[in-house]
Image (cartoon, helix red, strand yellow):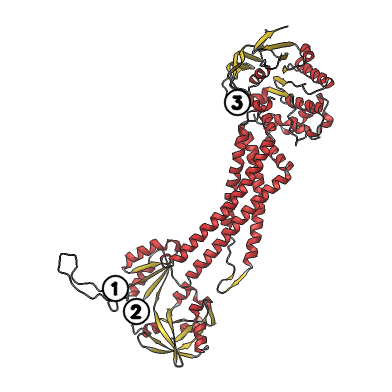
Amino acid sequence: MPSEPVLQTDKIIKYFHEPVKFKVLDGISIAINRGEFVSLVGKSGSGKSTLLYVLSTMDTDYEGRLKIDGETITGQKQNSLATIRNEKIGFVFQFHYLLPEFTCLKNVMIPALRLGKYSYREIEEKAYHKLEILGMKEQALKLSSKLSGGQQQRVAIARALINDPLIIMGDEPTGNLDSKNTDIVFDIFRQLSQEEKQTILVVTHDNDFAQKSDRIIEMKDGGINMRL
Amino acid sequence: MKRNNYNINSYISTTYVISQRRLTLIASLGVTIGIAIYIFMISLSSGVDRFSTASIFKNTSHIKIYKNEKISAPLIDNDGKNIGVIINPRIVPESDRIVNPLQLIDLLNRQTSVQSVSPQVSANVFYAAGKSQISGHIVSINEEADRMFNIGSTIVEGSMEDMHNTANGIIPGVGVAEKLNARLGDNISITSSRNVTKILKVVGLFSTKNQGTDDTKSYVNMPVAQQLLAEGPDYVSVINVNITDYDKAVSVARHFSFLTGYDAEDWITANESTVASEDMRALLFSAISFSILLVAGFGIYNILNMTIKQKIDEIAILKAMGFQGKDVIRIFVQQGLIIGLIGMLLGVILSSILIFLVSKVYIGGDIGFFPVVFEFSIFAEGLLFGLIITICAGYIPARKAANVDPVAILRK
C-alpha cells in the first residue's frame, strides 16, 4: 500500500438494544485508501448503513477502533467529532436535507462558514464554483425549496464538497433519483475520486452503480464478504 | 486560524426569524404586553407609594422626640418579699416636659444623620365664634418647621413672611376661617385647655385639601403656643427631626432614644398601617406584573418549541455537517432573543405612552393629577427581567435541540 489508509477500522462491534439485544456489526475491519471509490452493498438489515454511521463519527456507541486520516476517532468528545466532520467529511443522504429558507448558494456555504477557514468572499466564490461543477450555477440564488428533486440532490452534493473533504459519504445518494440524474451523480463521484483524490464511500442498493465503482464491500449479517 | 468573523449561527437564526414573520410578531407582541404592563404597573405603584409617603411627611417628621407621660410608681419595689404597698397610680404632673430643649436640639443638630431639627408646641384649643365654640388645635410654627413640612406651599392667602413679622399672628385652615367668618386681617379669639384666652390676628390661610385638617388646625408662633399653655419660653412638647435617609428612621430613632433619654418615635412606627398597606400593594403589583411577564416568556418558549419540532431534520443535518451542541443552542437562544428584544423595544414605547396618558388623568382633592413616576430604574428593571425570561425561554428548548441525535433522524 502506497500510503496510510484514509479510513481504517479495527474489529468494530455494535449492538442494537431495542427491541432485543442484537449484534448488528460483528468485528468489521476495513481499510480504505485515498482516492478510492467504494460501494457498500448488502441486503436490508445487513448492517451497511449502521457501519456507515459509525464511520461517519456520528454514531459513537460501538466497540473497536476507528481511525480517520491517521487520527484515532474512537473515544473523542462530541465537539471534536463535530469539528472533524466539518473539516474532513462531506455527507450526501437519500433525502437532500437542504435548509428550505435559504438560497442554494447559502446552503452550500453553511459548512464553510461554520469552519471559518476562509473569508466570506472566498467562500462565496468557492460555493459558486462547486455549484458550477454540478451544473447548478444558474439556480444559485433560488430558494432551495423551489428546485426539483434531482437539482436539490446536486445542491446537497455541492454542499458536501464545499470544505474539500477527505471523504465523501453517501447513504443511498441516488435512491430518489431517476437514471439520468443517477448517472450525473456517479460521474461527479468518479471525477472527484480520480481528479481530486477524494475518497468516496457510498451505501447503495443500485447494483449498476456499485459495479461501476472501484471496489465493492458487501455486507452480510454484520460481517463482510470481500469481492473484486 | 479563524479568518472570518462572519457568524453563521446569527445568520441562521435571523433567517428563521424573518421567514416566520407572523409567529415572530405574535410572540413579540406577547413580550410587548408583558413588559409594558410590568413597567406601567410598577410605575403606578411607586407613584402612589411616593405620594402616600409624601403625604405622611406633611404632618409627621421622620422622627418625633417627646416625653411620654409617666405613671407614678410606689417608692418601695413590690417584689413579693416586702409588705404589699397600696398605691393609686396616676400621671405625674408636668411629666411631659422636655428638660433643657435647647441643649437637646444642639445635640441632635450635631448628629451626622440629621437633616433638620424643629421644636414644636401644640395645644388643643377652642376657637370662639360668637357664643358657640369650635374645638381644634394649634401647632407652633417656625422657619425650620415650615421647611420640614412644606407649610408654605399650602398657604392660599397671606404669607409666611407676615407670620414671622406679626407676633400675635395666626394662620387658620380655610375651614376654620370659614366657620369663624374670619378674613385676612381679622382678629379671632382662642381659648386653651389651661383657660388662657388670646386674641390673634389672621395673617394667612392654609388649605391642605384634607377637610379634617383644614377645619381644625391653625398655626401660631411658638411664644403664643407657649403662653396658651401657660408655660415659659423653654417649654417644648415635641422635637421633630428629619434625617437624611428616611428609610433608616427605625434604627436612627432607637439611637436617638438612647442618646436623649426620651421617647423617639419613627414615622414608620407612627404610620404602621399606612406603611403596611403600601408594602402589600407593592407586593401585589409586582406579583401580577411578574406573572404577565412570565406568560410572555411562555409565548417565546412555545414558538421556539414549534420551530425546533419543525426543523428537527435541519438541526440533524447541521449537526452532521459539524455544528456543535453549543452552536445549535446559540441559534435558537438568539432567535428567542431577537423576538424578546423586538418585544421589549415595543414594550418600552407602549409603557411610556400608558404612563404619559395616566399622568394626565386628574384625580382631584389633594392628589391632583394621578401620581405616576417616570423613572429609568423601573424601565431598566423591567427590561432586565424581560431579558432573563427571554433567555430562559429560549435556552430550555434550545438545549433540547442541541441534544438531537443526528443518526436517529437521518437514518430512515
Mark 2 or mark 3, which is nearer to you?
Answer: 3
Q: Which residue is mark 1?
A: B70
Mark 3 or mark 1, which is nearer to you?
Answer: 1
Amino acid type of the residue that numbered disc 1 sits on in the rendered structure: Lys
User: At numbered mark 1, what does the secondary structure look like: helix, strand or loop?
Assistant: loop
Amino acid type of the residue that numbered disc 2 sits on in the rendered structure: Tyr
Residue B289 found in image quarter: bottom right
Cα–Cα span, label 2 and label 1: 17 Å
User: At numbered mark 3, what does the secondary structure look like: helix, strand or loop?
Assistant: helix
Q: Earlier in the sequence, mark 2 or mark 1?
A: 1
Asked if residue B247 lies left or right of residue B400, the reply is: left
Q: Quadrant of the N terminus of chain A?
A: top right
Q: Which residue is mark 3?
A: A80
Q: Tell me if residue B356 comes above or below residue B125 in the rendering.
A: above
Q: Which residue is rendered at x = 81% and y = 26% of the image?
A: A150
Bin the neighbour count of mark 1 within 10 Å (Cα to Cα): few under 14, some 14-19, many 20 and up.
some
Instruction: Write down the chain letter for disc 3.
Output: A
* In-front residue for pair A113/A152: A152
Q: Which residue is mark 2?
A: B235
Q: Which residue is rendered at x = 46% and y = 85% of the image?
A: B170
Cα–Cα span, label 3 and label 1: 83 Å
Bin the neighbour count of mark 2 within 10 Å (Cα to Cα): few under 14, some 14-19, many 20 and up.
many
User: In this orientation, does residue B316 appear?
Assistant: yes
* In-front residue for pair B298/B263: B298
Instruction: Write down the chain letter for disc 2.
Output: B
Measured as percent of width and height from the top left, residue B183 is found at 53, 88
Q: Share a chain, discs 2 and 1?
A: yes
Instruction: Write down the chain letter for disc 1.
Output: B
Amino acid type of the residue that numbered disc 3 sits on in the rendered structure: Ser
Q: Tell me if residue B173 comes above or below residue A61 in the rendering.
A: below
Q: Quadrant of the C terminus of chain A?
A: top right
Asked if residue B181 lies left or right of residue B120, the reply is: right
